[in-house]
Image: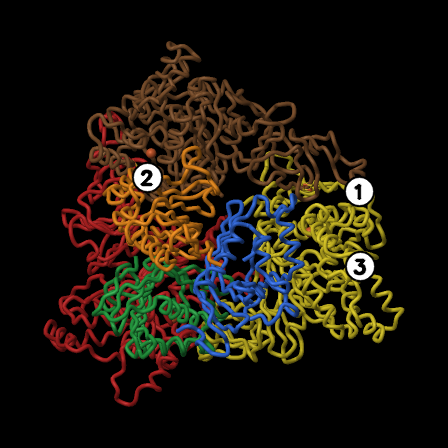
Chain colours: A yellow, B red, C brown, D blue, E green, F orange
Amino acid sequence: MTHYSEEQIAALIKEDRVHRDVYTDPAIFDLEMERIWGRAWIYVGHESQVRQPGDYFSTSIARQPVVMTRHKDGEVYVLFNRCAHKGAQVVGDGCGRAQQLRCCYHGYVFDTDGTLLHIPMAEGYAGSDFKKGSPDSNMRRVPRVDSYHGLVFANLAAEGPDLQTWLSGAKASIDNLVERSPEGKIEIAGGCFRYVHDSNWKMFVENLNDAMHPMVVHQSSSGTAKRVFDDQFKEGDKVPFELEMLAPFTNDYAFFEKMGLTAWDYGHSVTGGKMSIHSAYSPIPGYIDSLNAAYGEEKVNEIMAVNRHNTVVYPSFTLKGAITSIRIVKPISVNKTVIESWVFRQVGAPEELFQRSITYCNLINSQANLVGPDDWEAYHRLQHGLQTKDSNEWVSMHRYLDQDEIGKDEKTATGTSDMVFRHQYQTWKSYMLNQGGTSL
Amino acid sequence: MTHYSEEQIAALIKEDRVHRDVYTDPAIFDLEMERIWGRAWIYVGHESQVRQPGDYFSTSIARQPVVMTRHKDGEVYVLFNRCAHKGAQVVGDGCGRAQQLRCCYHGYVFDTDGTLLHIPMAEGYAGSDFKKGSPDSNMRRVPRVDSYHGLVFANLAAEGPDLQTWLSGAKASIDNLVERSPEGKIEIAGGCFRYVHDSNWKMFVENLNDAMHPMVVHQSSSGTAKRVFDDQFKEGDKVPFELEMLAPFTNDYAFFEKMGLTAWDYGHSVTGGKMSIHSAYSPIPGYIDSLNAAYGEEKVNEIMAVNRHNTVVYPSFTLKGAITSIRIVKPISVNKTVIESWVFRQVGAPEELFQRSITYCNLINSQANLVGPDDWEAYHRLQHGLQTKDSNEWVSMHRYLDQDEIGKDEKTATGTSDMVFRHQYQTWKSYMLNQGGTSL
Amino acid sequence: MTHYSEEQIAALIKEDRVHRDVYTDPAIFDLEMERIWGRAWIYVGHESQVRQPGDYFSTSIARQPVVMTRHKDGEVYVLFNRCAHKGAQVVGDGCGRAQQLRCCYHGYVFDTDGTLLHIPMAEGYAGSDFKKGSPDSNMRRVPRVDSYHGLVFANLAAEGPDLQTWLSGAKASIDNLVERSPEGKIEIAGGCFRYVHDSNWKMFVENLNDAMHPMVVHQSSSGTAKRVFDDQFKEGDKVPFELEMLAPFTNDYAFFEKMGLTAWDYGHSVTGGKMSIHSAYSPIPGYIDSLNAAYGEEKVNEIMAVNRHNTVVYPSFTLKGAITSIRIVKPISVNKTVIESWVFRQVGAPEELFQRSITYCNLINSQANLVGPDDWEAYHRLQHGLQTKDSNEWVSMHRYLDQDEIGKDEKTATGTSDMVFRHQYQTWKSYMLNQGGTSL
Amino acid sequence: MSAVAEDQNKGTQPELKELEQFLYHEARLLDEQRWAEWNELFTKDGEYWVPASPEQADAQNHVSLIYETELLRAVRIKRFKHPNAFSLQPKPRSVHLISNVMLDDYDEHSCVLSSRFIMLQYRREELDTFGGSYTHHLQRVGGDYKIRKKRVDLINCDAPLGSILLYL
Amino acid sequence: MSAVAEDQNKGTQPELKELEQFLYHEARLLDEQRWAEWNELFTKDGEYWVPASPEQADAQNHVSLIYETELLRAVRIKRFKHPNAFSLQPKPRSVHLISNVMLDDYDEHSCVLSSRFIMLQYRREELDTFGGSYTHHLQRVGGDYKIRKKRVDLINCDAPLGSILLYL
Amino acid sequence: MSAVAEDQNKGTQPELKELEQFLYHEARLLDEQRWAEWNELFTKDGEYWVPASPEQADAQNHVSLIYETELLRAVRIKRFKHPNAFSLQPKPRSVHLISNVMLDDYDEHSCVLSSRFIMLQYRREELDTFGGSYTHHLQRVGGDYKIRKKRVDLINCDAPLGSILLYL
Ligand code: FES
Ligand code: FES
Ligand code: FES
Ligand SMILES: [Fe+3]
Ligand SMILES: [Fe+3]
Ligand SMILES: [Fe+3]
């Protein structure tokens, strides 16, 4: 495996393009796990997945098994899912409830905050370093854990910016997500998809703010949906949700241009703001009323005026506010990535809103549906096309170069600009050179 | 692949714990193949598998294909299964009988001791180094081969201790195995299992002397067997073999403590001695009589008084004397290992003894049964739990530290001590640092 | 991955043998892709696969996706199958016809010669380096492309000998192939086989000039065919094609000896010349007449007197003139290789000639037939036998050492000599040491 | 052993052999990519459903791999022919094997069939194996049957999965 | 082509369709993890046997992947419900496909069926495919059948195998 | 739903159950490696064909994975027993599952069957899965059937493939 010097890493990123190796070299991938995924705040789950003391949800951070628990002190903990004894994964995959965590190999028992509770035949440890109270005899906690509106993030690095500082401009997307609940509460519901991609994790992440691709990649699904609509419906017919959702993917370029792009420190970004492909859905009966009752009309108008399409909280978390759904990035290897799709229920809103989100995820994110597989195919072709090492070695990010508007702590650009990609790789370079992930 | 300096290797092993990398790093695995598996005596097979001249049995040593043969001189040979011509595997996998070994590619013919016998169109080699008599024109023999009571071991290193010296205290386990035959003879019979594990080879090896795990891991099988017994049988009923075998796995800790542990040079060890989970089986009608007839009662009492549970002949061979069965370790990669289970017939003993061993293997070692899969699961969780590289990096071996009794050429400890693990890793370190594998 | 110094590479090749690592070490394989496959002319396809402007055929060179196209200028181009934008594979696998090549991700459009034709929202690139006319905005062409009698070869290196110089003595095999068409024209027809081998690419390449193997490897198929013939047919019966084809594989050694071997610069070679296992087929009614009409009898006798068995155009292309079929080498990894078999139609000859070639390929090259799988098995056993790293490390190439006849620009030897293998590895060494691939 | 006993007020028991042939015919239309004909096997309100969890209760409150009524089947089938459906280029193929067909329930107008299946999907050198259970709710229409509901329970419906490009 | 010809002194030939349904029902009980009901399909002396070698002669003198009479089935089935059966957490699932059912022999009281099967086992993101032949020795009990012996010949019974967690 | 309707001038429709048994019997002879008996199921001019492309028109102008008339079957079957057929050492095994059997056409003298199959091939620790469609052209001979033509369409017949050692 090649070793990369700082110079070599820096040379992979140019202002207007990046080198193919960032997508194809296993050595780069391993460095990313250490320097990006090992230092950024990584999304773990939502507190609603562990409501009661003893609830646990096991997942992974940068390929390391962890478990999120609700402890009797009411706090949420994220523990490395690894027994302090000989290292066995303590919680079998999945979620559930247990008053204590008992390892399957020798029955050592830990509290839901990781504290060692019981060792069979403890006398065997008399006088040794393995004993209650010694941190190495507990299930270790991930160095830093924090949550924002119930979204739990963890950080493998003990030092670094706190969660809210790090979220910077992306916070507003989460605020808006939660405000769309009359009770200001969201909860995970309705299961999830886990979509296996045979491509590098960054291809998915970049795609979310790629306004140039929908009218090409999704022409066969969205375009067809429009045609079916024209065939089967006439002026004034109520449009089925499904077609309302599929149609806008092939809006014209001007539409996507107008959506606009915004980026913040640590690589976060958003498409849309004032409008998005989700703006034009027909109203859900009673939804606005329930919001008005809660916030008053003026505030509600503000809330609903925010139309952020895809928010990327770099590198692991992506959000669709209007759809109240998220997609989580799980890198497996340099050319394998699992994308998880989850749906939130807006507590207090009509069930129909939640059910619309379910339908949206079926249509767009399912492995068996009409939209996702065409994105999958695009990533697949990127990964394979980039095997041509004797061809052009560079991936272009030239669109609207030098036309970014630099604000106090954000950058903005027109919808089809490559600004966000350039920004992501400046961030990437900062992380990879141990410079902290800021670039503004 | 990381290169390991001697300092780095030494740093992986501490008196009371070892570093996770010994189980997870492919570079360590490759070094193990070279320095441990390339220098220790590795079990190949039993002479009863090649009774007649021409019989062969093909297997592998440290991932290298070899073939054990019986030559017309009556000797057993272990040859690299590799043609001297262009290198084709000469013997297709499996066993059988052949007067000569003929390569499938160009028909070069070798004797069952590896000697080149016939080259088609031999004139083509006139004046070249490839010719009869030249050692490089034969199928090469594994540098050293020796057997003890018919158990054939081979050594990839030309230099080093002879087999019996190296077996040290483990010899007694083999002696006792063979003495349990009225004729002092054992033979392989009844086929074998080959169980694929997705974990490092050392996890299996350590497990065999791990007296802390059965009552936890095997509670669902052994515990259930006991319950079924209580439901279906009453005081004084003849207990079916199957339940007699399953029940003791969940004996109490005191029982396992009492079994005790003993370790010898080169990493070998045993659980039990005076008693084991196999001690309490009901007698096989006629068996003891047949032994008495052969050895006289006093000697037989001695023989049967030996109750060694699991003997580990580090790293490749493990033995259950009372069950007359062995399990062989075949490392495939850092996280893949195949375990072969074989059964011996005690020649001259009632067939019922052999059939009980068959039943035992079905119940305990089969991939489809109730005991093995729970051990498999424990190793799997170890391998996955140890992926948490940012958690505690150490695997604990603290039990009864500093309480080993050091004898002249053996160490002993109470049954639940980690003594054997600590001893194995001192041996591991010695081998890996090219210091010969002794540590007493 | 080991780094290889020039000394280490040179040490792998001896005059009379080569080291096992050339077949088993992934690091060597990667170097081969760069220094041999990256510098030799590699077969891409035949012009008849892209007859009309817009026709394309996508394939790979040294694991890099490329596409062969026919441009409106009538020329054949070989492009890296990689979009100039973000690198997606532009042409999905397979062949077809398209007036332009449109990338599936963002719809950038390229001409069939690779030139960028259209960018959606091109204004986004104003003032950037990404624009029409800039070479990095086109689909790059493989540095050098040339064809000989319609056989298209490409070269990843910009510098080096031109195709015809490089083909040297192998040209005559291609000439003879084409002359066997009354119109001097061949065309690809009848589909192809893609046979996956779990062995190194050189095992297949060497096998083609290995006259020592057929009577051993193919005894069970060819030998059986002969026996069936003896059972079912009598003196003078018309022999079915199928048996005519299968029988000669087990001709005696003298026959293969007589065939002879010839080798040229850059590693090319041929078995046969005056006679081959294909010489004795019964005539195809009307075929010779059609040739006579085209060339006159004398010339035709010359043409048909040439009986080249297997021609190897090192490393990627192998030819059977009499059967008008080729086998193409596609290395995948150090122990995985795909062999493609294609058939040519001799334009103007009776269809029966073509159909005989189809039948031959079915019988010999199909993955499901009687001949290929036994070769496959031999390569498999080589790859596995060579895992015995602690046995003899050398692969023998001693046959008829020092008895090669060195001509002006060719070497010749008796049919069962290892001359061709020795010659291939001198070439291999020259390429791997950056010395150009010549060795005469 | 037939799962349901003959029963007066349920009408005469349908011929299992006929029902099997119906399922084979349906599978064949899918393998031969005769989607329009396949779609016609459904009733006007017919549903095609591939849950994303075992024992999933409904398609409204939990995500599904596919949940299609007539409208969405029309979109998908139209898309199959679209020149720019890139995930269908090169074209995927399927083979459906159906076994263990059992008649779980029936009345005069309808019946419920359970079966097991394996579907092989092939595209661009990748061969994928999908397997699970079918539950067909059929309606008698004249002498023939229509699909009121087809439920496909993939054994690994909640596992990480790649693209499923064709109807299961 | 039916494997055995009608024959007076063998009694009337059993209905293949019925026997198929019996096998499907058995498979379904396994897939639905209704093990107690499944176990009741066996006669008191019923055997379940998965040999470890092709053409294995008996279960006494050669190891078997599984050889279970009533006692061991009781242990296994009880264990399936045990809270600490870690290799069953998360819970494995199965799908059994049965095909090529042939009646090899029969008399008034019993019959022998041969069939082919594929069993898909899924657990924790791993999907395993097992395949081979079944031989069912059935006994007529009243109007119904019981399993006297079920023999499962895995095509790769002697290969290196991972864990088999459910009945094949 | 049966693919072909009863029809006077076609003679009486053959019993599907019987035809299924014929296919199962054929598969069984292959799995049990009783090749001579299997070969006898073919008519004198019987063909066994595995095309190398989907919808391949003929075996003369396009390569085929296997195209065998009586002569080549005789060679292959004789070879199966040859002591030096190295690709058959160790011996490969197979399991054929046949499902979805449909009667596509028939007349007094012959019929055409379509079905789906999976064939598992095992050898030396490798388990391969092959799947696709069968088309059997059968001829009535006395009370029995003979195979005039067996066409095997592998779903991935044009993919890169390893060795196929046994009849599909
Ligand atoms: S590994 Fe967890 S208790 Fe021992
Ligand atoms: S490789 Fe063994 S004879 Fe040539
Ligand atoms: S990658 Fe080809 S158009 Fe963007
Ligand atoms: Fe998209
Ligand atoms: Fe255990
Ligand atoms: Fe050959």
Which is nearer the N-term, disc 1 or disc 3? 3
Circle 3: residue type: Ser
**Distance between mark 1 and mark 3 Cα atoms:** 26 Å
Residue at x 52% of width, y 35% of height: C62
Circle 1: residue type: Tyr
Callout 3: SS: loop
Q: Is residue B89 visible?
A: yes
Is residue D22 rendered to the left or right of residue B313? Answer: right
Image position of B184 with respect to C402: above or below:
below
Q: Residues within 10 Å of mark 1 (few under 14, many from 20)?
A: many
**Distance between mark 1 and mark 2 Cα atoms:** 67 Å
Q: Report if the beta carbon of the residue with label 2 is closer than 8 angstroms to ligand 6.
A: no
Q: Nearer the viewer, residue E31 or C134?
A: E31
Image position, residue B210 (x, y; %)? 39, 71
Q: Are the residues flagged by discs 1 and 3 in contact, CB closer than 8 Å?
A: no
Q: Residues within 10 Å of mark 2 (few under 14, many from 20)?
A: some
Callout 2: SS: loop
Q: Residues within 10 Å of mark 3 (few under 14, many from 20)?
A: some
Is residue C231 rendered to the left or right of residue C72? Answer: left
Residue E122: mark in rendering: none
Residue at x 82% of width, y 55% of height: A409
Circle 2: residue type: Thr
Image position, residue A268 (x, y; %)? 74, 55
Image position, residue C145 (x, y; %)? 57, 25
* Discs 3/2, front: 2
Residue A400: mark in rendering: 1
Q: Which residue is mark 3?
A: A279
Q: Nearer the viewer, residue B204 or A301?
A: A301
The chain carrying label 3 is A
Q: Which residue is mark 2?
A: F69
Q: Are the residues flagged by discs 1 and 2 in contact, CB closer than 8 Å?
A: no
